Image: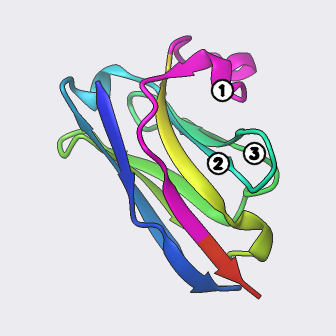
Amino acid sequence: VQLQASGGGLVQAGGSLRLSCAASGRFLSSYVVGWFRQRPGKEREFVAAINRAADSTFYANSVKGRFTVSRDNAANTLYLQMNALKPEDTAVYYCAVSTRGWTIGTLTSSSNFGSWGQGTLVTVSS
């Protein structure tokens, strides 16, 4: 499966953005999928994940209550709704598929994800 993230941009603190991740090559419904981000000078970190049926989600503590991950399997697309954005959310955001399925203990490690798409840059100004 090939993934392409989009929807990034420049937004003021407190604002919102919605990221999309379009899949091609295979049906996204076959995969547990997640969002990661890489802030300047930092390692890639887990943001959120969603299971195949879209009835379970998992979030990093830093975004819980502000970000919402969702998917439209018919459209072969993953989304990340980001509200109440903070300057520390500034990062390149990536989508990827889990190679370990829906196993909570593995979801936060980027080494358990593959098919990384090109990221999309989100910049939050203060």
Vertically, is 27 above or below 70? above
- Residue at 81% of width from left, 46% of height from top? 42
Q: SS class of the residue under badge 2? A: strand
Tags 2 and 1 touching, CB below 8 Å: no
Dot 1 surroundings within 10 Å: few (below 14), some, or many (20 or more)?
Answer: many
Secondary element type, mark 1: helix
Q: Mark 3: few, some, or many residues within 10 Å (few <14, many ≥20)? A: some
**Which element is circle 3 on?**
loop
Q: Mark 1 points at which residue?
A: 110
User: Given the image, on which type of amino acid does mark 3 rest?
Assistant: Ala
Please state the horizontal and vertical placement of residue 123, each as a whole percent of the image. 62, 73
Q: In this view, does 110 lie to the left or right of 70?
A: right
The label shown at residue 37 is: 2
Report the amino acid beneath label 1.
Ser
Q: Which residue, as the protein is rendered here, is positioned at the far top? A: 100
Left or right side of 76 for 79:
right
Q: In this view, does 47 lie above or below 113?
A: below
Q: Can you tell which mark lies on residue 60?
A: 3
Q: Which part of the image, by quadrant, shows the C terminus?
A: bottom right
What is the three-letter code of the residue carrying label 2?
Arg
Q: Can residue 43 be seen in this view?
A: yes
In this view, the residue in front, 34 or 87, is: 87
Q: Which residue is drawn at 29% across and 30% down?
A: 2
How many angstroms separate mark 3 from mark 1 (CA)? 13 Å
Residue 105, magenta (yes or no): yes
Answer whether labels 2 and 3 touch (C-beta < 8 Å): no
Residue 112 image offset from top left, x and y in percent: 61, 17
Q: Is residue 3 magenta?
A: no
Q: Nearer the viewer, residue 101 or 55?
A: 101
Magenta part of the chain: 99-122
